[in-house]
Amino acid sequence: MRGALLGSGLVHVAIVAALFVVRASAPVIVPGPDVVQVSLTDLASLQAPARPAPEPARPSLKAAELKPTDEEGVKLAPPKQPPAKPEKPREQEPAPEPAPQLPYAQIGNSGLAGQVAVDARDFEFTYYLMLVRNKVAQAWAAPAGLPGGRRVRAAVYFRIGRDGGLSSIRLEEASGIEFFDRSALRAVTLSDPLPPLPLGYPGGALGVHFGFQYAQP
């Protein structure tokens, strides 16, 4: 019995000794710091991305290569345009003539005649124009020295106010004989004032064209 226990104890001692020897011979590894793996990169590749390579140019189709099956094609006739109408020449509107008017009629001495026209086309008071012609005729006398066998004419323009006063007296048409023109202007000036304008005339003044004519009888 003792022998068996002794043998078992020696076996256990031998096993423990063997384990101690095996453990003592194994290398001891000391843990160290973590290792970081670093790779170097080209800085030029980080600054600008690489541009893709340009695509090769596609061959363009020349106009000569595009040919229709029918060389002549379909010809379209140009649209018919209506013939241009000739422009009618613009007719110049004649300047309105002074109206109404009293035609030349004998006034005063033999050979003298007077004509009266006004600017207002709606002036319908003919009797007033006759008063004006008679009043001017009383102040006009043919000057001496007029050529015989020749008709001499002049025209004087003036304005008659509501009260009959005259203004804007001027020679409108010269006769070519200075003293005849002066006699016409003098006759109008001496006729101031004329009779007041008719009450039925709405205007504030009346423009008058008075014609003077002399023809030797």
Image (cartoon, helix red, strand yellow):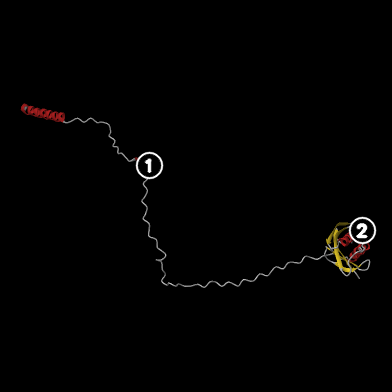
**Crowd around label 2: few <14 · some 14–19 · many ≥20 (10 Å):** some
Residue 209 spot, x, y in % from top left: 85, 63
Left or right position of 73 against 38: right
Quarter of image, res 81? bottom right
Quarter of image, res 62? bottom left
Residue 77 spot, x, y in % from top left: 52, 73
Q: Relative to 108, say whether 41 is above or below.
A: above
Whether residue 179 is visible here, answered yes or no, is yes
Residue denoted by label 2:
190
Q: Relative to 108, say whether 2 is above or below.
A: above
Which residue lies at the image location 35% right of the left edge and 40% below the top edge?
A: 43
**Callout 1: SS:** helix
Whether residue 102 is visible here, answered yes or no, is no
**Crowd around label 1: few <14 · some 14–19 · many ≥20 (10 Å):** few
Three-letter residue code for mark 2: Leu
67 vs 24, nearest the viewer:
67
Which residue lies at the image location 7% right of the left edge and 27% below the top edge?
A: 6
Instruction: Find the distance from the CA under tag 1 to the CA under tag 2.
Output: 110 Å
| Residue 47 tag number | 1
Three-letter residue code for mark 1: Gln
Residue 203 spot, x, y in % from top left: 85, 59
Kindly indicate whether the residue at mark 2 contacts the one at mark 1 (C-beta within 8 angstroms): no
